[in-house]
Amino acid sequence: MPKQSIRPPGSVIFFFGICIGLILAFAAVWGDYEGLSYFYTGAGYPTFNGLKCPILMTRSETGTVRVNFDNPGVEEIEPYYEVTVSGQASMRKFEGQLPVPAHASKSIEWTVDARDMDLGFFIFINMDVLPVAGYSTREDNCGIIVLNIAGPTGGQILNLSLSLSLLGIVIGYGLWESDAKKNARGSDNLSYAMKALGLAVLLAMLTGFLGWWLAGVLFGVLTILLMVIVLRLFVNP
């Protein structure tokens, strides 16, 4: 079988989408990992899983951090929380208590901006929730990457990049498959590998966006390995 070119438009668009997706996944993972390291004390409290932070921001914008408190129990609870926000000069700290009715949820929000940056281009947030309703002390943290870009917001950059990644993967694979069938150059192994590569990068982005940084790293590494396999199959089908 003749060697396949890696230059047809479909394969180029496909790899373009994969590369953007991989960058987004590692950006999400990088911020959260740095946040974990920034506030590490060795205490090792269970994870709270209620802290929601932007993945990307720009220096000119103000971002919103949100915390959700869920109460699945049958009695009202009043969780007490302590928040620490990074800063190059000094860290901000505030605390509070919030009544949450039974079988309900409540949330709090606050803003962050470039004044909260540290380590060059990160904003870090840490939250401790003291024992309540059978739960021990829990904590959560996150890291936001701040881009030095004027104009669009971090959310707009993220949405545009995600759209380009998904479109690149879907359209690129479709064009490649159509070209392969037309010219009888495709192989089942290559097709399966490309599908696996697309799925791996999607899982890397999903887990990274959800804050599951370890799973995001694993799927990111799997994506890189599959990229190598796909490239080898293009050259030696």
Image (spheres, grey):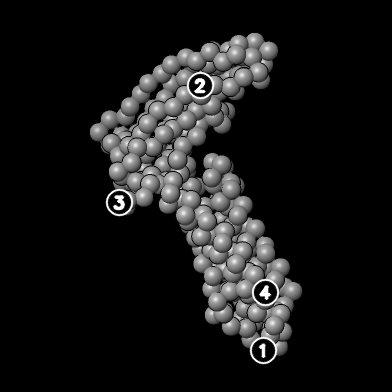
Residue lying farthest to the left in this orientation: 89
Name the quarter where the C terminus is drawn: bottom right
Gap in angstroms between the C-alphas marked 2 and 1: 62 Å
**Residue hosting label 1:** 2
> Which numbered tag is attached to residue 96?
none
Query: Which SS class for mark 3?
Result: loop
As shown in the figure, which amino acid type bears the numbered disc 3? Ala
Along the horizontal axis of the image, is 180 left or right of 12?
right
> Which numbered tag is attached to residue 150?
3
Along the horizontal axis of the image, is 201 left or right of 116?
right
As shown in the figure, which amino acid type bears the numbered disc 1? Pro
Label 4: how many Cα within 10 Å (few below 14, some 14–19, many 20+): some
Gap in angstroms between the C-alphas marked 2 and 4: 51 Å
Tell me if residue 193 can be seen: yes
The location of residue 4, given as percent across then percent down, is: 62, 83
- 1 or 3: mark nearer the eye: 3
The location of residue 20, given as percent across then percent down, is: 49, 60
Residue drawn at point x = 67 percent, y = 64 percent: 195
Residue drawn at point x = 65 percent, y = 79 percent: 179
As shown in the figure, which amino acid type bears the numbered disc 2? Val
As shown in the figure, which amino acid type bears the numbered disc 4? Glu
Gap in angstroms between the C-alphas marked 4 and 3: 39 Å
Please tell me which residue lies in front, 170 or 203: 170
Gap in angstroms between the C-alphas marked 3 and 2: 36 Å
Q: Earlier in the sequence, mark 2 or mark 4?
A: 2
**Residue hosting label 2:** 129
Q: Earlier in the sequence, mark 4 or mark 1?
A: 1
Q: Earlier in the sequence, mark 3 or mark 2?
A: 2
The location of residue 161, given as percent across then percent down, is: 47, 56
**Residue hosting label 4:** 177
